[in-house]
Image (cartoon, rainbow, N blue to C red):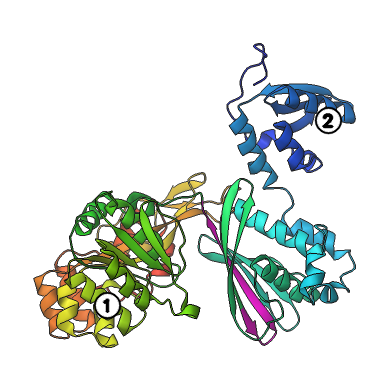
Amino acid sequence: MLDTPDLKLIQGIDDKDVELSFLKNIPMAFCKVNLILPLSIEQGRLKALVYNENSFFALREIAAKHGVEPVPLLAEREMILQSISRFYGRIGSAEEVMENIEGEDLSMLAKEFETPKDLLELTEEAPVIRLLNALLQQAVHERVSDIHIEPYETKLEIRMRVDGVLNTVIRPKKIMQDAIVSRIKIMANLDIAEKRLPQDGRIRILLGGSDIDIRVSIIPTVFGERAVLRLLDRKQGVLGLSDVGFDKHYEELFSNVLTMPNGIILVTGPTGSGKTTTLYAALNVIYSVEKNIITVEDPVEYQLDGVGQIQVNPGIGLTFASGLRSILRQDPDVIMVGEIRDIETAEIAIHASLTGHLVLSTLHTNDAASAVTRLVDMGIEPFLVASSIVGVLAQRLVRIICPKCKTAYEPEDDKLRYFNEPPLKLYRGKGCEACKYTGYFGRTAIFEFMLINNAIRTLIGSKADAVLIKGKAIENNMQTLRMNGLEKVKQGITTLSEVLRVTHKDYADI
């Protein structure tokens, strides 16, 4: 660090301290190499974070170029690097790049992207590359989970999903369609000549200090190929049960079931409801050096230390069923199966649970009770379902009220009818810059946890329907998804409209 005792060490900077319009004229690589972050020019003075002599000399060079006085602000190396990633991530949104591209000649794009050779010869200044880089950069900065590239008859639309909600970002010219998809295929090592069949691939990139794993899905449609990119931050790590959304009561209840030596624990919900994240959190609770834990997943989203993870590959015959069958020869204590999709996988999982293994898996059902009837519908004998399953957790994701613009209000009478004990006040977000004026920032889960006791086992064995099973579970003090969601509404975590949105078809208001 720069040996200047007269300079006070800066601990942090706010958004208002950085002039992005000035920063975009200085290459990010220059700042990283010299450990410097120019902040702003005010009254003939250039303020910048510096770390060592190289930083100071770089600051003097920039100041001289602009004819201003250098003002160094001393900061730790890590803080400067994090700030560089943070603020450069906000420069050059997809909209800005599109505005610049609009004035360029795009007539040669289709020809440029006809063959792999032409693609590989493209420079980093190619319009499509600039646009995709800007999209990915914006996605990381805005906590985007998915990017959708959607072709229609006369237009191309690009949408991003933030906190579970899709919004249109840009509408590039239709002529760019094939070039954008071809560029994505090259990045994901897919066949750019194949346009008739669906293709899946992966991209791994570093963006703004974040290690991002991107799952790519491309399918042919009537108006061209449609691409969806799902972003996963590899540095985020595995969450704990409380991070997922469990309150103390549910965390204790679920953790107790996870200590069982054998049986099946199912997590249910639609696609994108956070089931896999909950399973990872559960494995985090179970993990110890004394246990052998093996998973079979599609795909492996996060690497877990001390856990053997198998990636499903149907192309070579490695399915959930075949992977699970092989796992049983590895002397496991705990098995996680990404999803029970067919009767073969279900039978092997039940066999494993009945021979001394704890099995965790997921099912696509609307609620907890439907999970057991779904297995029976698959062809599993009811007595096997009743004797193997120890608990079923149904869940949905709801958006969290933005903490920076959260305000209380007195609810109207039509909203109070959902509560057994009407609250005096509820909460909502007014909308601010932090939440992009949506009133929400981040997501959490609401749950419905059905413990399988003797009464419910009897109902399962008699082939009772899901309504009867759910009614019995509620008699045993099970909270439905809506009940648990309303508790989070009263606590000011989410809004009533969010809970009603994700539990609209929940028939459990019994």
Residue 225 magenta-highlighted:
yes
Identify which amino acid the numbered label 1 is placed on: Ile
**Count of picture labels:** 2
- The stretch in magenta equals 219-234
Q: Name the residue: 89% across, 30% down.
A: 65
Answer whether residue 412 is visible to the viewer in this image.
no
The quadrant of the rendering that contains the N terminus is top right
Identify which amino acid the numbered label 2 is placed on: Ile
- The picture places residue 367, in percent across and down from the top left corner, at 31, 73
The image quadrant that residue 53 belongs to is top right
Which one is nearer the viewer's eye here, 5 or 369? 5
Asked whether, in this view, residue 256 is left or right of residue 134, the answer is left
Asked whether, in this view, residue 268 is left or right of residue 125, the answer is left
Asked whether, in this view, residue 125 is left or right of residue 236, the answer is right
- The picture places residue 58, in percent across and down from the top left corner, at 79, 28
Answer whether residue 366 is visible to the viewer in this image.
yes
Residue denoted by label 1: 348
Which one is nearer the viewer's eye here, 155 or 134? 134
Residue denoted by label 2: 62
How far apart marks 1 and 2 lie (CA) works out to 66 Å
Q: Main secondary structure of the magenta part?
A: strand
Label 2 residue SS: helix
Task: First in sequence, mark 1 or 2: give its number.
Answer: 2
Depicted 362 relative to depicted 44: above or below? below
Q: Name the residue: 58% across, 47% down.
A: 434
